[in-house]
């Protein structure tokens, strides 16, 4: 297929050229045309054979032009649909990269909470980040998980109070809407913790029903949108394959334009 659209004949041009060739090759009608003698209207067998050869060439040209036209139309829909689909599919990975990015001069605790049985994200959870202390554990801060269950808390050395360790030892706990603790992560000491601590967790949906219901709705919406985008991509790509019959185009009454 030619890559330069300016030199590639358009479908109407191909059809018009073929019809002109038909008229040029047609001689005085001596026999009526019929399904048994489709070229009976031509004055000689030689001219009929010439037309068969020309028709074979036109079939190839029509196919190439038709595919080129449909591919161009298809890509106007397929490209943005694929891009949005890829963004959806990469959103979890990209979000995790964002929440675990270091912050200059600060410590970071980040992670994600999912429903333990379904794996559905738990949005709007109350997450407290704690600093382990031999006497009294300190609350470094509280955040809410986002719509996909991710959370991130930044704090500085001044936010935790201890005299022996140089680095904080952190864990997280989750509260329900009534303020009761429904989850606590590992509380063992994490000596020399890094600047970024990743603490993920999983909770039974019954313990945080409002979050679990919201997360399920968001998950279903995302899944439906992905399904719709995939259907759109499949339809447009298959359309190119299914609508390239040159004979039906040549026999149409509208110079090959789509009906």
Image (cartoon, rainbow, N blue to C red):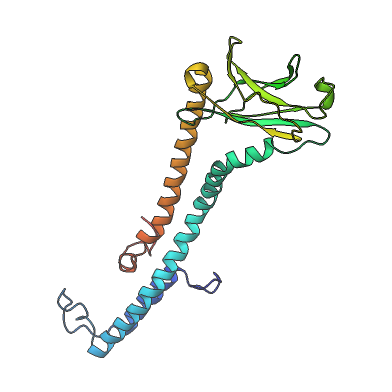
Number of numbered discs: 0
The quarter of the picture where residue 162 lies is top right
Left or right of 111? Residue 209 is: left
Q: Can residue 44 be seen by looking at this rendering?
A: no
**Residue that lies at the very extreme toward the top in this rendered image:** 178
Q: Position of residue 251 (x, y in %)?
A: 30, 66
The quarter of the picture where residue 183 lies is top right
Q: Nearer the viewer, residue 192 or 94?
A: 192
Left or right of 101? Residue 16 is: left
Determine the residue positioned at 37% across, 79% down: 57
Residue 29 sits above or below residue 3 on the image: below
Q: Nearer the viewer, residue 166 or 92?
A: 166
Q: Position of residue 259 (x, y in %)?
A: 36, 55
The quarter of the picture where residue 182 lies is top right
Residue 209 sits above or below residue 70 on the image: above
Determine the residue positioned at 41% across, 59% down: 240
Left or right of 241? Residue 108 is: right
Q: Position of residue 205 (x, y in %)?
A: 48, 21
Determine the residue positioned at 80% across, 21% down: 160
């Amino acid at each position: 297929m030619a890559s330069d659209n300016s030199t590639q004949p358009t479908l109407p041009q191909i059809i018009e050229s073929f019809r002109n060739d038909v008229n040029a090759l047609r001689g005085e009608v001596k026999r009526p045309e019929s399904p048994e003698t489709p070229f009976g209207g031509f004055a000689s067998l030689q001219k009929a054979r010439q037309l068969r050869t020309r028709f074979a060439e036109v079939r190839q040209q029509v196919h190439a032009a038709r595919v080129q036209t449909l591919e161009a139309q298809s890509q106007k829909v397929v490209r943005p649909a694929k891009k949005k689909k890829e963004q959806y599919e990469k959103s979890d990975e990209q979000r995790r990269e964002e929440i675990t990015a270091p912050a200059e001069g600060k410590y970071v605790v980040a992670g994600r909470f999912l429903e333990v049985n379904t794996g559905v994200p738990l949005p709007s959870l109350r997450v407290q980040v704690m600093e382990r202390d031999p006497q009294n554990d300190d609350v470094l801060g509280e955040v809410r998980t986002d719509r996909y269950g991710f959370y991130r808390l930044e704090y500085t050395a001044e936010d935790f109070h201890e005299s022996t360790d140089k680095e904080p030892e952190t864990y997280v706990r989750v509260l329900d809407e009534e303020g009761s603790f429904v989850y606590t992560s590992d509380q063992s000491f994490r000596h020399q913790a890094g600047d970024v601590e990743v603490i993920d967790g999983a909770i039974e949906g019954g313990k945080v029903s409002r979050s679990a219901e919201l997360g399920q709705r968001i998950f279903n919406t995302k899944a439906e949108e992905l399904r719709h985008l995939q259907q759109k991509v499949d339809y447009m790509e298959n359309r190119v394959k299914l609508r390239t019959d040159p004979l039906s185009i040549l026999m149409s009454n509208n110079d090959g334009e789509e009906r």
